[in-house]
């Protein structure tokens, strides 16, 4: 039985309403003032409070503030004859669940109560029903995808349903959806194996190589200050989780997904974003800016130089600034001086925090425990974002009128399936791709390109090839196999082929 406390100095006028509610299973308690209602709540538990706005002594709005302070978990419905918009806004600002105007009839109150107490159940029921209807449609769509654009649309749909089903806490349906996503990823890997080389030759294929030219360049002019924010290792589902926070300050002009090149790592994909060239072209044209797989050097040391050269090739004579923000202290300093960015047409900012979390999951047991699923990982991302200097950057940028372009270089995937691999002594170290002279891998777990140049990658020797892990596999050497499986299983990795790694969010946003 739902227990209702009704606070109104003229409560006797509502006896017929109370009888109406009690016949429908509600237990209604009465209080004649805000003070009396608060005293009642200190001694008794109720499920909801109905309260009049205009009462002598402690008014309804003042009582609501005390209720939210002392009994925050108890929902409140305000009943008033006051139609003043400011009063209504003030009430809603104090987080009342509903605002009903007098004269109020019993059915209005009943509907309000049903809306509040049935809402979660109704949403869950409707969401489950809608997913059941969509399940076969998604399966059909998986088999019909014939282009990267088709796969991107499908991925958007899968992310939408994954977030919806996660929010209603239906673990069984989430498992069904994740199984469907895993099936989609396996089919997607076969698609990439057959079509990736041709896609790279197609000028319409939007990838790391041309994303700047196609989708940043058109916004650059000498009259507007643009912040190009790149969050390393940032997935589309993480964007959808933080989107409501961002859209408090910015309106979305354009949202797309583009494809990271292979390997889906910073060395390859991010260097291509800033150079506007493939890794093979970058190595040939700017050998001093390229570090090969087997050099223990910073693989992204020359991004600013690569960007400067790309701007020149595009004929852009603009002022630009490049920053990497690794620590909170760096971000705070940046935000203090953010108003000075109006001197630049383009300011590029690299945030590495998401990448730090994903790598910490392997090394820090605490992170592994709290980020034990994609939902938990999204929740962790949202918690970080709400308390980060990045949201402060976004708020201040909106106030200053800066346009923001927000994107990433690649995503990552939670890996579960160990796959044995071996090669020559000189073999790359990444868990999701390998390059070497001789690679022995399990064919069902990999996509192999025997001539790297055909997919615009450097050949590090005359016989070198690249292999990429499919879906949620990760590579483990036969030596100390069990130890490394235990260490890396259920960690976030990138470099291979999956929708989560290859499909990158790209947003153009204008200040509200």
Image (cartoon, rainbow, N blue to C red):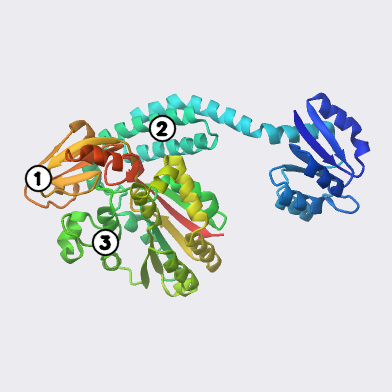
Residue at image point 78% right, 32% down: 110
What kind of element bears circle 2? helix
Residue designated by label 2: 178
Residue designated by label 1: 424
What kind of element bears circle 3? loop
- Residue 352 seen in this snapshot: yes
What kind of element bears circle 1? loop
Which one is in front in this view, the residue at disc 3 or the one at disc 1? 1
Q: Residues within 10 Å of mark 1 (few under 14, many from 20)?
A: few
Q: How many marks?
A: 3
- Residue 5 left/right relative to 388: right
Mark identifier at residue 300? 3
The x, y position of residue 235, in whole percent, is 40, 47
Dot 2 or dot 3: first in sequence order is 2
CA distance for labels 1 and 2? 36 Å
Q: Quadrant of residue 282?
A: bottom left
């Amino acid at each position: 039985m739902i227990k209702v406390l009704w606070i109104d100095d003229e409560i006797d006028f509502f006896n017929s309403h109370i009888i109406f509610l009690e016949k429908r299973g509600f237990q209604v308690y009465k209080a004649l003032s805000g003070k009396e209602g608060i005293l009642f709540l200190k001694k008794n538990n109720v499920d909801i409070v109905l309260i009049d706005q205009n009462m002598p002594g402690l008014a309804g709005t003042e009582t609501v503030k005390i209720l939210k302070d002392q009994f925050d978990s108890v929902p409140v419905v305000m009943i008033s004859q006051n139609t003043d918009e400011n009063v209504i806004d003030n009430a809603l600002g104090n987080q009342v669940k509903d605002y009903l105007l007098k004269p109020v009839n019993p059915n209005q109150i009943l509907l309000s109560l049903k809306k509040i107490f049935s809402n979660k159940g109704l949403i869950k029921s409707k969401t489950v029903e809608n997913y059941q209807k969509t399940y076969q449609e998604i399966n059909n769509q998986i088999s019909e995808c014939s282009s990267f654009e088709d796969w991107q649309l499908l991925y958007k749909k899968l992310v939408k349903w994954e977030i919806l089903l996660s929010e209603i806490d239906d673990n069984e349906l989430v498992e069904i959806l994740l199984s469907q996503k895993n099936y989609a990823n396996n089919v997607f890997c076969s698609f990439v194996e057959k079509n990736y080389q041709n896609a790279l030759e197609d000028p319409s294929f939007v990838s790391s190589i041309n994303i700047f030219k196609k989708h940043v360049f058109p916004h650059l002019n000498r009259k507007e200050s643009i912040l190009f924010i790149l969050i390393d290792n940032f997935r589309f589902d993480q964007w959808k989780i933080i989107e409501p926070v961002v859209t408090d300050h910015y309106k979305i002009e354009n949202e797309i997904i583009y494809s990271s090149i292979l390997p889906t790592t910073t060395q390859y994909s991010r260097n291509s974003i800033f150079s506007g060239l493939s890794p093979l072209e970058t190595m040939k044209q700017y050998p001093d800016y390229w570090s090969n797989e087997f050099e223990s050097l910073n693989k992204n040391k020359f991004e600013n130089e690569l960007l400067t050269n790309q701007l020149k090739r595009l004929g852009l004579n603009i002022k630009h600034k490049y920053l990497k923000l690794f620590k909170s202290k760096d971000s705070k300093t940046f935000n203090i001086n953010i108003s000075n960015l109006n001197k630049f047409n383009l300011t590029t900012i690299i945030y590495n925090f998401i990448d730090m979390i994903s790598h910490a999951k392997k090394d820090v047991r605490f992170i592994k425990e709290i980020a034990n699923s994609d939902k938990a990982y999204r929740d962790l991302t949202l918690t970080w974002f709400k308390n980060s200097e990045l949201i402060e950057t976004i708020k201040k940028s909106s106030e200053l009128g800066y346009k923001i372009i927000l994107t990433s270089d690649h995503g990552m995937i939670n890996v579960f399936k160990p796959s044995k691999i071996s090669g020559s002594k000189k073999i790359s170290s990444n868990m999701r791709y390998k390059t070497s002279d001789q690679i022995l891998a399990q064919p069902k777990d990999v996509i192999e390109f025997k001539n790297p140049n055909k997919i615009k990658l450097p050949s590090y020797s005359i016989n070198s090839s690249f292999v990429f892990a499919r879906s949620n596999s990760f590579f483990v050497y036969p030596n100390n196999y069990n130890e490394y499986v235990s260490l890396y299983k259920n960690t976030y990795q990138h470099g291979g082929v999956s929708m989560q790694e290859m499909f990158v969010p790209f947003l153009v946003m204008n200040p509200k």
